[in-house]
Image: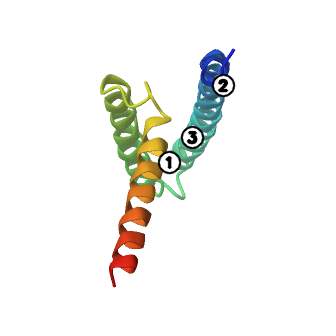
């Protein structure tokens, strides 16, 4: 079995771990966000501070909605299909740049 075969077999388990981490992180963040949102809603109902938390709730809501749209767009655009490709592209470009700089130094 070659090294590339081993990496192909490891990828599904790595993908599951990444997905599990992502789902866990989003769930925890969602719960915390919901808790904070309800805390603000309780503040609005009090007579002495009525309306204090309305603006933060609106801002939180719009920001959360924006992130939800970005996440949906990323999934629909296939941004999570090959998450290793950008790393390899970056390393390839870096190596090409290093080779070009070394060639330019030798020419001087």
Secondary structure at badge 2 equals helix
| Residue 71 placement (x, y as % from top left) | 40, 33
Whether tag 3 and tag 1 are in contact, CB under 8 A, the answer is no
Q: Of the two numbered discs 2 and 1 on the same chain, state the one appearing first in sequence.
A: 2
In front of the other: 66 or 84: 84
| Residue at the spot of label 3 | 33
Secondary structure at badge 3 equals helix
| Residue 68 placement (x, y as % from top left) | 39, 34
Instruction: Please state, as top left, top right, bottom left or bottom right, where the C terminus lies in the image.
Output: bottom left
| Residue 44 placement (x, y as % from top left) | 50, 48
Residue 42 higher or lower than 30, as above or below: below
Q: CA distance from mark 2 to mark 1?
A: 60 Å
Could you tell me which residue is drawn at 62 percent across and 33 percent down?
A: 31
Corner quadrant of residue 5: top right
| Residue at the spot of label 1 | 44
Could you tell me which residue is drawn at 59 percent across and 31 percent down?
A: 22
Q: Of the two numbered discs 3 and 1 on the same chain, state the one appearing first in sequence.
A: 3
| Residue at the spot of label 2 | 3
Instruction: Please state, as top left, top right, bottom left or bottom right, where the N terminus lies in the image.
Output: top right
Mark 3 Cα shell of 10 Å, populated few (<14), some (14-19), many (≥20): some
Secondary structure at badge 1 equals helix
Could you tell me which residue is drawn at 54 percent across and 47 percent down?
A: 40
Corner quadrant of residue 18: top right
| Residue 97 placement (x, y as % from top left) | 38, 63
Foreground mark, 2 or 1?
A: 2
């Amino acid at each position: 079995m070659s090294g590339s075969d081993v990496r192909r077999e490891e990828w599904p388990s790595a993908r599951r771990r990444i997905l599990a981490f992502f789902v866990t992180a989003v769930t925890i963040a969602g719960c915390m966000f919901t808790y904070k949102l309800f805390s603000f809603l309780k503040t609005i109902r009090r007579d002495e501070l009525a309306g204090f938390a309305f603006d933060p709730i609106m801002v939180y809501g719009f920001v959360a909605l924006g992130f939800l749209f970005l996440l949906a767009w990323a999934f629909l655009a296939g941004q999570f299909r090959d998450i290793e490709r950008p790393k390899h592209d970056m390393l390839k470009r870096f190596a090409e740049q290093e080779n070009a700089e070394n060639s330019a130094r030798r020419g001087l």
